[in-house]
Image (cartoon, rainbow, N blue to C red):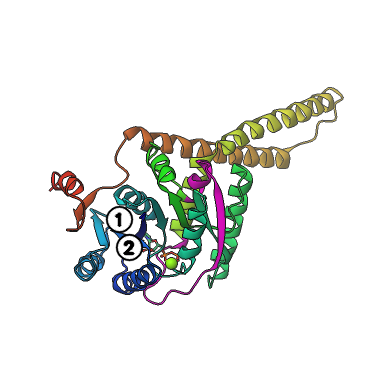
Amino acid sequence: MSLLSIVLPSYNEEQNIVNTGKVLSELMEKNGIDYELVFVSDGSKDNTYAEICKLEQMNSHVKGAEFSRNFGKEAAIFAGLELASGDAVVVMDCDLQHPPEVILQMVEKWEAGAEVVEGIKNSRGKENIFHKAFANIFYGIMSSLIKIDMKSSSDFKLLDRKVVNALLEMPEKETFFRALSFWVGFKKESVYYDVRERQFGSSKWSFGSLVRYAISNVTGFTTLPLKFVSWFGVIFVILGVGLGIQTLVKFCMGTAVEGFTTVILLLLMTGGLIMVSLGIIGNYIARIYEEVKGRPRYIISKVTDNMPEQVKGAWKKND
Ligand code: UDP
Ligand code: MG
């Protein structure tokens, strides 16, 4: 019988762990699915890890790990993928905003031959208007840049073992799970769901962290912004030549105007564009710098008793 791993990145989710664990285990047991729950506490500042250990005592299908600090949801997802041993892996939020029943449809499609089952949002649930607008703009840009429709995509998906292994082989440190699972290819199916409301705790995303996430994902996936920089240059050269000829002609004809306003406007425009271009280039250099350092994606400080011995051994060395 095949094993289904459910990976749950958790950051300050002490109120959710036990409840989510219970809901998922009941669902799996009722439907006769062999499963494991892999909780990754992302350097939580509350009792999330203690709750994971408590849940593990109650349910032998649970295992978990704790990061040495907050490394972000992406890192927690990848740690979960690495620690999962199932033939298929479902990644979902541990606040039950991703409806657990949808996992059954995902498993059905997987058993029918799909290798990636994407969870697609019917609606984005209750988000504030800025968050919604920002998400729309960001995913609009991303979709056209990487030629994949990302507007309704989420981190809620099922991946076959082959796909998990392909993802784990990618060397980059800054990942974008949502788009990478498109990028790797494989046979895809979709299931649709409505985002539920959070019962306990609150969302971990601030506007600033969303903007950083967006920039990192755009630079991680496409070099198109760098090409914009060249286009800015070409457009300015063409404009410059045109304006230069006009100015010279006027000068020769003795009708040159006193062009203070024009000069100031041109200075401000070119100055602005140069700064923006430097910013774009800088972002890519920063990314190269981060990747070249070759630091690990995350550092695990503790793993629970249910982790396989070799995993425990590997992390104990860091004690
Ligand atoms: N999360 C995480 N690390 C972080 C932020 C969030 O592991 O730095 C987890 C969080 O515990 C939750 C999931 O990612 O399981 C989604 O986070 P959240 O519910 O805050 O986001 P939202 O649903 O509001 O988009
Ligand atoms: Mg949530």
- Secondary element under disc 2, as helix, strand or loop, is loop
Q: Is residue 54 magenta?
A: no
Q: Nearer the viewer, residue 283 or 295?
A: 295
Residue 97 position, x and y percent, is 45, 69
Q: Closer to the camera: disc 1 or disc 2?
A: 2
Image region (quadrant) for ligand 2? bottom left
Check the image and report above or below for 238 versus 169. Answer: above
Q: Say what amino acid the circle numbered 1 marks.
A: Asn
Query: Horizontally, is 48 left or right of 129 in the view?
Result: left
| Quarter of image, res 8 | bottom left
Query: Horizontally, is 1 left or right of 150 in the view?
Result: left
Q: Please count the marks in the image.
A: 2
For the residues labelled 1 and 2, the Cα–Cα distance comes to 8 Å
Are circles 1 and 2 on residues that touch, CB within 8 Å? yes
Residue 174 position, x and y percent, is 40, 43
Check the image and report above or below for 291 versus 47. Answer: above
- Is the CB of the residue bearing disc 2 within 8 angstroms of ligand 1? yes
Q: Earlier in the sequence, mark 1 or mark 2?
A: 2
| Magenta segment boundaries in residue numbering | 178-207
Q: Residue furthest bottom?
A: 199
Q: Say what amino acid the circle numbered 2 marks.
A: Tyr
Q: Is residue 202 magenta?
A: yes
Query: Horizontally, is 50 left or right of 184 in the view?
Result: left
- Is the CB of the residue bearing disc 1 within 8 angstroms of ligand 1? yes
- Secondary element under disc 1, as helix, strand or loop, is loop
CA neighbours of label 2 inside 10 A, class few (<14), some (14 to 19), many (20+): many
User: What residue sits 26% from the left and 67% below the top?
Assistant: 48
Tag 2 residue: 11
Tag 1 residue: 70
